[in-house]
Image (spheres, rainbow, N blue to C red):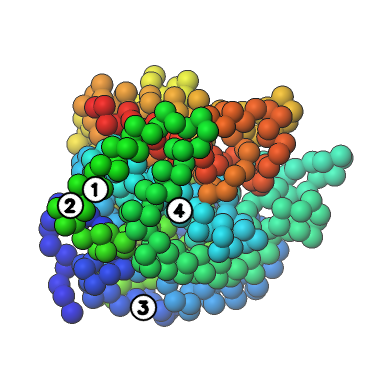
Amino acid sequence: MRGPPPATTAYPGGVNQFSPDAPARAHDFSLSSADDGLAALSAWRGYPRVQQPVWPDEAERSAVFDDLRAAPPLVFAGEVDVLRERVAAAARGEAFLLVGGDCAETFAEATADRIRNKIRTILQMAAVLTYGASVPVVKMGRMAGQFAKPRSGDEETRDGVTLPTYRGDAVNDHAFTLEARTPDPQRLWRMYTTSASTLNLLRAFTGGGFADLREVHSWNRGFTSGSGYDRYEELAGQIDKAIRFMAAIGADFDALKVVEFYASHEALLLDYEEAMSRVDSRTGEIYGTSGHMLWIGERTRQLDGAHVDFMAKLRNPIGVKLGPTATVDDALRLIDTLDPEREPGRLTFITRMGAGNIRDRLPALVEGVRDAGAQVAWVTDPMHGNTITSSNGYKTRRFEDILDEVVGFFEVHQGLGTVPAGLHMELTGDDVTEVLGGTGEIDEEGLTRRYETLVDPRLNHQQSLELAFLVAEMLSRR
Ligand code: PEP
Ligand code: CO
């Protein structure tokens, strides 16, 4: 058994947390529900809680909770600890974080093909971003746990019929019937098993040769040879040269076949997150084991609320979404509560300001946090501040607004001399038509072709790659 990881700032390239090279720590999760170490976690039940379903049957909820508590963890403390170092590197500008995946995963779409397509898209984006940013890209899915959604209303009315809103497959079904929309705690168990099978594929794909850089690059060549995408050929050509150079100097491509890939989701359903928390009996620390990184959403980040209280007790890297109304004071108080030790890699602020707001609102937040000496990672979510309704009634976003928010994010950090640490995207690996624009020129009529999301519109495969190429071009010019 090896000791704790060395205090190194180096990011070991393609080394994988699932490989023997990862710093192995003696973590031994307690599975006992009577464990004293976990008792403190349930304090959230005494705080104001929002966005929680009302489960119709308390005995059934409690039985599922016990089953989850006794089940094996989905992720492991050693992986979570490595990720904390990766996020710290991103906050210093020595790595770049790329997070991508559905707004809401669904049980029906947790198929091998869909999961593979998403992973492939993220790997393809990461390859170009690595070249553009000249730093390692930390790859992360909004995957294997992103099954619960905050909603703006509790009820939805259609043709005079009012039913509870859809809150994600972890809670209820999207079909518009009373039975489907009634929260069912058995779905929490299904969330666990679906997350487990998704992670299983994720670990197999990213450890089994699928992530070979040469293969990923050849997929990207396929993208740039598509009609209209030839403007990206120059960058792809440069990457070609870089890969040939690596081959010439004898780079070990086999070692690069295995990549780190992390899972993250919004820790919305505190019943589930509490049941999935485990004590590391060696240190007494509590890890959320439903995903490597967990985030608090814009609607649940109340300082005196249940989510902040709960997440403060976990050892995982934590994200907090900050929308246009967030103040410096909010940010500083969140830091005091969630990161009192100012630990590098602990806290990420994911801003989602909207393209029209980011250049006005972000500078004061970043300056206020910097001046207070806190070391957070700043990540942009250019999706959630740019949602519109098309004239034919679709919830959509414009590719140009998404790109503009990303550009604004880089401009603000460049102006302040601070670090843009990453991108957080809603995307899919499939050819859906949910976001307007891009070289594929999806227009309002185009939205009708293949609009599949149950909640927010996602970039499709081509749009995701195009965004990555545009950001990489921007980064490589700096
Ligand atoms: C989301 O990430 O899907 C989401 C609901 O975001 P936010 O909390 O920023 O609105
Ligand atoms: Co969303």
Q: Position of residue 100 (x, y in %)?
A: 45, 47
Mark 2 or 4 closer to N-term?
4
Question: Disc 2 and disc 4: Cα gap in Å?
Answer: 26 Å
At x 65%, y 73%, the residue is 59
How many discs appear? 4
Closer to viewer: mark 1 or mark 3 = 1
Mark 1 = which residue?
244
Image quarter of residue 388: top right
Q: Residues under labels 4 and 3: Cα distance?
A: 35 Å
Q: Are marks 1 and 4 in contact (CB under 8 Å)?
A: no
Q: Which mark sits nearer the N-terminus, 1 or 4? A: 4
| x then y, percent, for residue 462 | 51, 40
Secondary structure, mark 1, is helix
For residue 120, which numbered disc appears in the image? 4
Amino acid type shown at disc 1: Arg
Decide which of 390, 461 is in the foreground and name it: 461
Location of residue 204 in the rendering, given as x and y in whole percent from the top left corner: 42, 68
Question: How many residues crowd around disc 4 within 10 Å: few (fewer than 14), some, or many (20 or more)?
Answer: many
